[in-house]
Amino acid sequence: MASATESDCIFCRIASGEMGTELIAESDQHVAFRDLSPQAPVHVLIVPRQHYASLRDVGPDDAGVLADALLLASRVAGEQGLYDGGYRVITNDGPDAGQTVHHLHFHVLGGKELRAGLG
Ligand code: DGP
């Protein structure tokens, strides 16, 4: 479900500035901040200001939010010096994917050779 914010959602609270988390980049629709448990030397989360539980909740009317997310992911990757070595952008949707925070987010990973493969 899409909604403006949810008071018990940690990423809504970070996006609103309530948690004091350092933002490393912003766009109209997203904030970017470092993952608490980094899986790579650079591990940044791209998080929409609006609450969507996961990718499946973004409908055609909101497709622009996905373009904005990927554009910010690319900008952050460049600003973090990842263009030479490359980087990965992923989102986890649902339990089999290992989603733990139920607010849509994209991981930007890089700074080392990432494991090959997708599963
Ligand atoms: P996922 O498995 O795709 O739902 O990843 C959620 C990520 O969010 C996980 O890598 C850890 C990160 N995370 C969870 N809570 C916080 C937090 O309060 N602050 C930050 N910076 N990252 C968090």
Image (cartoon, rainbow, N blue to C red):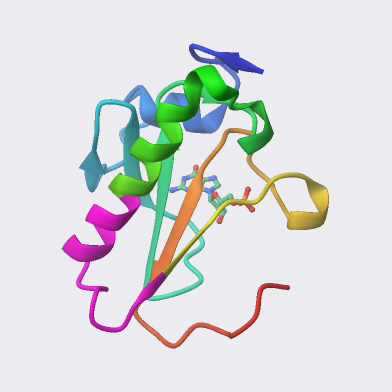
Query: In terms of image quadrants, where is residue 102?
Result: top right
**Residue 100 percent location from the top left of the image:** 69, 46
For image coordinates 81% across by 49% down, the residue present is 95
Magenta-colored stretch includes residue 74: yes
For image coordinates 30% across by 83% down, the residue present is 85
Furthest-front residue in view? 60
For image coordinates 49% across by 11% down, the residue present is 4
Up-down: is 5 above or below 87? above
The quarter in which the N terminus is drawn is top right
Up-down: is 20 above or below 18? below
Furthest-right residue in view? 96
Which sits in the foreground, 8 or 86? 86
Is 13 displayed left or right of 98 in the figure?
A: left
Which sits in the foreground, 115 or 12? 115
Which region is colored magenta? 73-87
**Residue 70 percent location from the top left of the image:** 38, 47
* Figure disc tally: 0
Up-down: is 32 above or below 117? above
Query: In terms of image quadrants, where is residue 88?
Result: bottom left
Is 4 displayed left or right of 116 in the figure?
A: left
Is 83 displayed left or right of 70 in the figure?
A: left
Query: In terms of image quadrants, where is residue 6?
Result: top right
**Residue 14 percent location from the top left of the image:** 40, 31
**Residue 33 percent location from the top left of the image:** 34, 47
The quarter in which the C terminus is drawn is bottom right
